[in-house]
Amino acid sequence: MSLPTQAQLTTSQNSRIPIVNQASYQYSDGTGKIFRGFSEILSTERGLFDPLGRILGCGGELLPDYTGFSIGVYETNPNDATGTELGRLVDLTRTEFPDVASNRIPGGKAPNTENLNPYFLQNNPSSPNLRGTYNFLLDPNKGQTQPGKTYILVVNPPANSVYQQRRIRIRIGESTGEETGVGNAQNRVLRYLATSLDGQPIRLTGETEFVGTVVAVADAELQGLDLLAFEFTTNLCQPNQVQIIKAGDRATAEPGDTAIYRLSLRNLVEVGLNNVIATDTLPLGFRFQPKIVRGEINGEVVEITSEINGRNIIFRANATLPPASVLNIVYGAQITPDALRGSGINSAVVSAERVDNRFRTQDGPANHKLQLRPGIISDCGTIIGRVFVDKNFDGEQQANEPGIPNAVIYMENGNRVTTDVNGLFSVANVLPGSHTGVLDLSSLPGYTLAPNRYFKERNSQSRLVRIAPGGTVRMNFAVTPTFQEDVKK
């Protein structure tokens, strides 16, 4: 007997092709003559296979309890050009089951026999095949199956659930022109594009967007309605599947110290996590110490490899993180004098891959701040300068060019500095960066700025200097008597 193949069975269920079954036979009589033949063709023109959508867990498993879960079909907001905002619920035509003749109410289809929107999922203990399933009937007379119509399928978990709401946009495309039929019923095949709006995969194979088809069933029981169930499984994954916690061995440190950090990566799901990768961004002036890296899970040593990419340190664990377990990664960083110019804050993130469906999950950033003290090292600088009589207008003081006492220089923060008897001044404990000083000519009666023959910027009353951490910089002002004959004296 020739049995239909699995592909034929699948095609029959999805495309409504009748299953054809026929047996062949062969025998011989006593004279050695062989007889061959075939049985009658048995055609099981089975009823329409109603396509159903289904809500499953992240690993493709049935949820233990569907109580409180609902799924609804919404119009898109007409004022939103992106097509991602919810509009009103789609006005579905009410149905009934069983169908009562002559009451002008169409017959419904299980599980959503009344065509409710939103529809609350059922556990269906009497019909296990319907657990977590849904379907909706669209009315062509209302234009609900026209190409270009866009809907947003919304899955709402109960308030106390570990899952979050899911949104999937569905755009109806052109009919493929293909028709399937059983008996006298002809069914149009519609095409649609499903797109995840929350970035989570739509199906177990990991796609966030795919093109599918659905049969708009022309069933006499439906009285002109189209069965639209979108035959794909929607996965619900809890948002917090892995957790990262960052800690340090100290609250304050000085240049030259070595800080020890701990990354604790906790598996929050019921399956193991592979390819665990933690990335820690060190602050300015922190130098990673690769020889101090250690890792362990439940007291067992785990091999941890590290990679340096700028200030990013990438840790990879060569082990599977079991459910409800914690992977601890310990490493050290030496603090250099440059750290005083940074924030002391480092930030870490983690990503991992579920072993059941290979979906990636992540968490972070987790931050840790180390208060930095200068210790014996300070990044503050010093400004030294002088105000002098420039006789040759080169901007530099020679031995025969005296300094001017009691000259006043104003800094950009409003502080005032006065020169000593030799025309010298200094400003200590200045933060690194750019600073400006302005000579107050009113403090120098009988003097004005000396023209500089070599550097035009020194013909200004102000000076701009830049100080490196712990550095020293000069800020000189050259002046000349208002009456040039005094210079000759």
Image (tube, grey):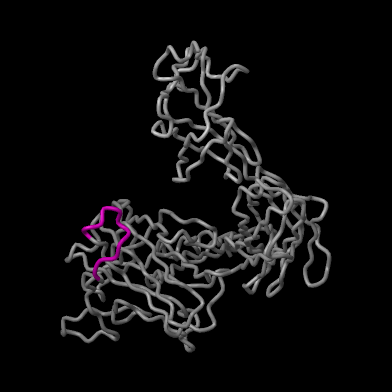
Front residue of 359 and 470:
470
Query: In the displayed structure, does residue 254 sit left or right of residue 242?
Result: right
Q: Quadrant of residue 457?
A: top left
Q: Quadrant of residue 365?
A: bottom right
Residue 81 among those drawn in magenta: yes
Front residue of 385 and 246:
385
Image coordinates for residue 300, horizontal then vertical, percent: 83, 68
Query: In the displayed structure, does residue 374 sit left or right of residue 206?
Result: right
Q: Is residue 362 visible?
A: no
Front residue of 385 and 257:
385
Image coordinates for residue 271, horizontal then vertical, percent: 66, 71
What residue is rendered at 54% in x and 58% in y?
205
Q: Residue furthest front?
A: 489
Q: Quadrant of residue 370?
A: bottom right
Residue 311 among those drawn in magenta: no
Question: Looking at the image, is 98 positioned above or below residue 445?
Answer: below
Image coordinates for residue 279, horizontal then vertical, percent: 65, 54
Front residue of 442 and 432:
442
What residue is rendered at 55% in x and 34% in y?
466
Q: Is residue 461 visible?
A: yes
Query: In the displayed structure, does residue 380 sit left or right of residue 183?
Result: right
Image coordinates for residue 438, horizontal then vertical, percent: 44, 34
| Residue interval drawn in magenta | 78-88
What residue is rendered at 47% in x and 40% in y?
411
Q: How many marks?
A: 0
Q: Main secondary structure of the magenta part?
A: loop
- The quarter of the rendered structure image containing the N terminus is bottom right
